[in-house]
Image (cartoon, rainbow, N blue to C red):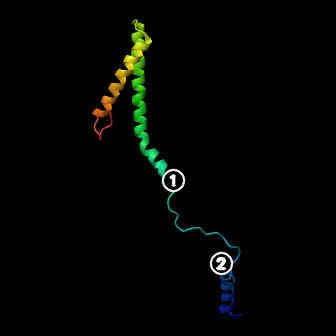
Amino acid sequence: MNRSRDSRSYEDYYVRQVGGGLPVFVGARVQRGHGLGSLFGGLIRSAMPLIKRGALALGKGALKTGLGVAGDVLSGQSIKSSAKRRLKETGKDMVSKMLGSSAHAPPVFA
């Protein structure tokens, strides 16, 4: 028995199998990007802190206005006139706080 012939036939058996068989889809080695969803997702993720801060400020303003209107109504003023006056005050206050804050520091809404 010749060992070199036996080992070669053993290797040949497996070498013939490489690349044979059914065709298999092979995609691109490197896939780039994730489409527009990635772009919009990134924009939303970066805008979320600003949206949250704005929503918090609106909530605080609404609470302050509501409490002011309730106090005015209890003291005898009409709901309509009190709400109009308080909404104007709150709107002016919020705008002045937004414009008065620096670009680097988050606005402070009290």
Secondary structure, mark 2, is loop
Residue 4: give x, y in percent of width and height: 65, 91
75 lies above or below 94: above
Q: Which residue is mark 2?
A: 19
- Outermost residue toward the bottom? 2
Residue 75, image x and y in percent? Answer: 39, 6
Type of the residue with mark 2: Gly
Residue 70 location, x and y as percent?
43, 13
Q: Is residue 31 left or right of residue 68?
A: right
Question: Can the viewer see residue 100?
Answer: yes
The residues tagged by marks 1 and 2 sit, at their Cα atoms, a distance apart of 37 Å
Q: Is residue 107 left or right of residue 70?
A: left
The picture quadrant where one finds residue 28 is bottom right
Q: Residues within 10 Å of mark 2 (few under 14, many from 20)?
A: few
| Quadrant in the picture for the C terminus | top left
How many residues crowd around disc 1 within 10 Å: few (fewer than 14), some, or many (20 or more)? few
Q: Secondary structure at mark 1?
A: helix
Q: Tell me where residue 5 sits by quadrant.
A: bottom right
Q: Quadrant of residue 82?
A: top left
Question: Residue at (47%, 52%) from the top-left corner?
Answer: 39
Quarter occupied by the N terminus: bottom right
Q: Nearer the viewer, residue 52 or 100?
A: 100
Q: Position of residue 107 (x, y in %)?
A: 32, 34
Name the mark nearer the viewer: 1 or 2: 1
* Residue to which mark 1 is pinned: 36
Instruction: Identify the residue at image location x=41%, y=28%.
Output: 58
Q: Amino acid at mark 1?
A: Leu
